[in-house]
Image (cartoon, coloured by chain):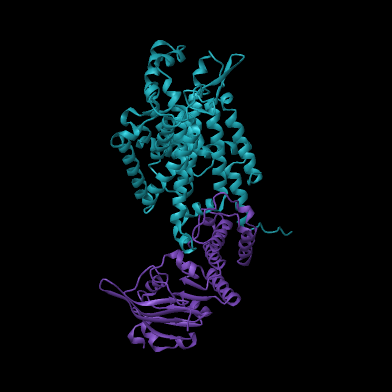
Chain colours: A cyan, B purple
């Protein structure tokens, strides 16, 4: 189906199901229970999962397949956001023209940055992309203020032209009248599920671009990109020019980033220069490595993981800790809370950093590798037994016993 | 007139004259070996042949076109394939994917954005790749990761990847370096078989005399950057100048 093998089709269907059921799956605890604060099923966070998932999927096409580590992808994220807000200002709050413009402008940016940066590989390439992203950030922050509104950030004002705006049109981002920040809440036995227009808009786009990345991974082009990562000497002596292949991968991943940036502005009609800062570029690298570079689902998992930490772990404060450990004797309670204090609230970065280190050291293949290992343990297909089966093919056959 | 003509090539690195007045004429369909002691300029010459080094003077013509200053992928498109001293293959990819890449390159040229096409629909190329794998007896290993192959198999795969593109000239840089005797003999058999079935012109740079005399139809002896003699293997064997170059003056 859709030009995919049977296995990939099943995989895609599972991904579609999980994405569409996210508002239910991420709401495992009933409202009012002490664990409800771990629920992640609210629109703002789910939109971030989908948007940063798209960002990471695109980044993975470049980094996972070709091995070129770009440290400047946030530039495209910012370009995408600015494009969408400009379309709001000039045309109307319909997100479609903005998203199309976001993809086009980020592709042009990626073409320019990629053309220069891809003259080098390895660390030099990373530094070049980082330099470009920082230049973009500084341009957006100060020099290009008429275009980006500097440190205030670009937003829509009442005196903006908005030439396509009709009288009764919504005054926040919408798609042909479907308003992004509207949602339906459904209560079932104490559980509350929020189905938001904005999330489903992002989710459907995420499914489409995931499908595209699956096709790219399985295409001859995908094999060529992996060949570049493995051996560029053989690549060129086989009659292939690696440069246009890496440039194409760079532009494609830049377009993904531009789309993600556009969607950020489609959910919330603002665009600020901080979106282009180097920390944002670093974040997508972390997402991809944490989830598993070069795997299809890994980057999405990594994106979800980091965004979950950022939004949920950071909300835990000392009062909540005290309520958890209230059963302990007073002195001990205070001691435990004191010990955990640096890892929660504003210290969520510390916890994430530790987890990142653990993953990189013990699971070089990222969360996906962890998942595979657990799956093999559960199904009894441990690595040991597999390797023994494999080895026996290469070992001499036992001598036939002669009586 | 030969398929590959090297005329009056000089190359100097600082104070070292690596190649001086090299003339070489490789005939169509022959197996031409270039031998010589260490430092004779064999590798320099090979790098000149693939356009990697540009000589100070002289020309290198292949089929009437100059190879000098061309990029490796352009050299390949002229019809020159190269086998390296240590096999250069795509280690992270499977044997079958390794075979597919040269098939795609031969058909589609240096670049094509086939990002949304599926491999399964390329029946003709799959057939070609499998046919070649069968010819080198590696079809059973098609799903193995190339880096896990034995050294002999890596060499076999590399040659298959070159041959599937039907090159006019195959350059081999010490194809048996570091191999066990059995693997060396297998490689010799493979190369002889390739030559008999396809009439491909081959240029071999080699240290191992056993390999050279099993394969070559003509031999050029290089010493200190200059060709000493060029002749058939029978005549080279007892040639006094060759003994001199290899064993020193006393033996001559």
Hey, which residue is sitting farthest right in the picture? A403
Please name the residue shown 45% across and 46% down the image. Answer: A251
Answer left or right for A170 relative to A145. Answer: right
Q: Position of residue B237 (x, y in %)?
A: 46, 86
Answer left or right for B67 relative to A151. Answer: right
Answer left or right for A191 relative to B56. Answer: right
Q: Is residue A138 above or below residue B23?
A: above
Q: Position of residue B34 (x, y in %)?
A: 43, 78
Using the rendered view, name the quadrant where residue A346 is placed.
top left
Q: Is residue A226 above or below residue A343?
A: below
Q: Position of residue A240 (x, y in %)?
A: 48, 60
Answer left or right for B84 relative to B119. Answer: left
**Camera-nearest residue between A377 and B189:** B189
Q: Position of residue A334 (x, y in %)?
A: 38, 14
Q: Is residue A306 visible?
A: no
**Camera-nearest residue between A122 and B225:** A122
Using the rendered view, name the quadrant where residue A130 is placed.
top left
Q: Is residue B190 above or below residue A36?
A: below
Q: Quadrant of the C terminus of chain B?
A: bottom left
Using the rendered view, name the quadrant where residue B72 is placed.
bottom left
């Amino acid at each position: 189906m859709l030009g995919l093998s049977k296995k990939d089709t099943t995989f895609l269907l599972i991904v579609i199901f999980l994405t569409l059921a996210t508002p239910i799956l991420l709401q495992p605890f009933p409202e009012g229970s002490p664990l409800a604060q771990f629920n992640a099923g609210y629109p703002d966070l789910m939109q971030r999962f989908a948007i940063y998932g798209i960002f990471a999927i695109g980044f993975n096409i470049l980094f996972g397949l070709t091995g070129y580590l770009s440290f400047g992808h946030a530039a495209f994220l910012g370009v995408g956001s600015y494009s969408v807000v400009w379309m709001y200002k000039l045309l109307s709050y319909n997100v479609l023209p903005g998203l199309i413009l976001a993809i086009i402008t980020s592709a042009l940016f990626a073409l320019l940055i990629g053309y220069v940066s891809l003259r080098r590989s390895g660390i030099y390439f990373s530094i070049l992309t980082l330099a470009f992203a920082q230049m973009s950030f500084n341009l957006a922050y100060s020099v290009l203020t008429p275009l980006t509104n500097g440190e205030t950030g670009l937003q829509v004002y009442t005196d903006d032209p908005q030439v396509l705006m009709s009288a009764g049109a919504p005054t926040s981002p919408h798609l042909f009248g479907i308003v992004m920040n509207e949602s339906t809440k459904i209560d079932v036995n104490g559980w509350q599920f929020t189905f938001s227009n904005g999330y489903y808009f992002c989710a459907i786009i995420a499914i489409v671009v995931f499908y595209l990345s699956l096709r790219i991974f399985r295409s001859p082009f995908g094999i060529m990109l992996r060949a570049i990562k493995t051996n560029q000497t053989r690549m060129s002596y086989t009659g292939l020019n690696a440069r246009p292949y890496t440039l194409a991968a760079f532009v494609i991943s830049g377009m993904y980033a531009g789309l993600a940036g556009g969607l950020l502005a489609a959910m919330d009609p603002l665009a600020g220069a901080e979106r282009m800062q180097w920390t944002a570029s670093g974040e997508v690298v972390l997402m991809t490595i944490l989830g598993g570079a070069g795997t299809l689902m890994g980057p999405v998992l990594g994106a979800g993981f980091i965004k979950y930490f950022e939004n949920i772990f950071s909300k835990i404060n000392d009062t909540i800790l005290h309520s958890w450990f209230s059963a302990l004797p007073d002195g001990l309670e205070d001691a435990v809370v004191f010990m955990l204090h640096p890892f929660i609230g504003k210290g969520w970065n510390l916890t994430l950093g530790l987890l990142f280190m653990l993953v990189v050291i013990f699971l070089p293949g990222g969360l996906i590798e962890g998942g595979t290992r657990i799956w093999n343990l559960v199904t009894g297909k441990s690595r040991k037994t597999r390797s023994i089966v494999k080895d026996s093919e290469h070992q001499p056959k036992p001598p036939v016993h002669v009586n | 007139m030969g398929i590959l003509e090297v005329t009056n090539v000089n190359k100097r690195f600082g104070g070292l004259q690596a190649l001086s007045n090299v003339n070489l004429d490789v005939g169509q369909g022959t197996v031409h070996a270039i031998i010589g002691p260490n430092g004779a300029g064999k590798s320099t010459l090979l790098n000149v042949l693939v356009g990697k080094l540009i000589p100070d003077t002289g020309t290198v013509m292949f089929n009437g076109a100059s190879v000098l200053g061309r990029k490796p992928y352009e050299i390949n498109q002229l019809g020159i394939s190269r086998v390296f001293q240590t096999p250069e293959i795509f280690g992270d990819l499977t044997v079958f994917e390794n075979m597919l890449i040269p098939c795609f390159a031969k058909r589609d040229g240096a670049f094509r954005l086939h990002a949304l096409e599926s491999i399964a629909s390329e029946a003709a190329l799959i057939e070609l790749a499998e046919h070649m794998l069968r010819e080198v007896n590696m079809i059973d290993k098609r799903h193995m990761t190339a880096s896990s192959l034995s050294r002999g198999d890596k060499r076999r795969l590399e040659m298959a990847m070159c041959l599937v593109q039907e090159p006019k000239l195959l350059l081999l840089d010490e194809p048996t370096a570091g191999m066990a005797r059995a693997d060396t003999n297998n490689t010799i058999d493979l190369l002889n078989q390739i030559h008999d079935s396809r009439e491909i012109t081959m240029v071999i740079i080699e240290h191992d005399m056993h390999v050279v005399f099993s394969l070559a139809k003509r031999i050029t002896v290089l010493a200190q950057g200059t060709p000493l003699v060029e002749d058939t293997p029978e005549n080279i064997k007892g040639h006094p100048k060759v003994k001199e170059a290899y064993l020193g003056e006393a033996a001559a």
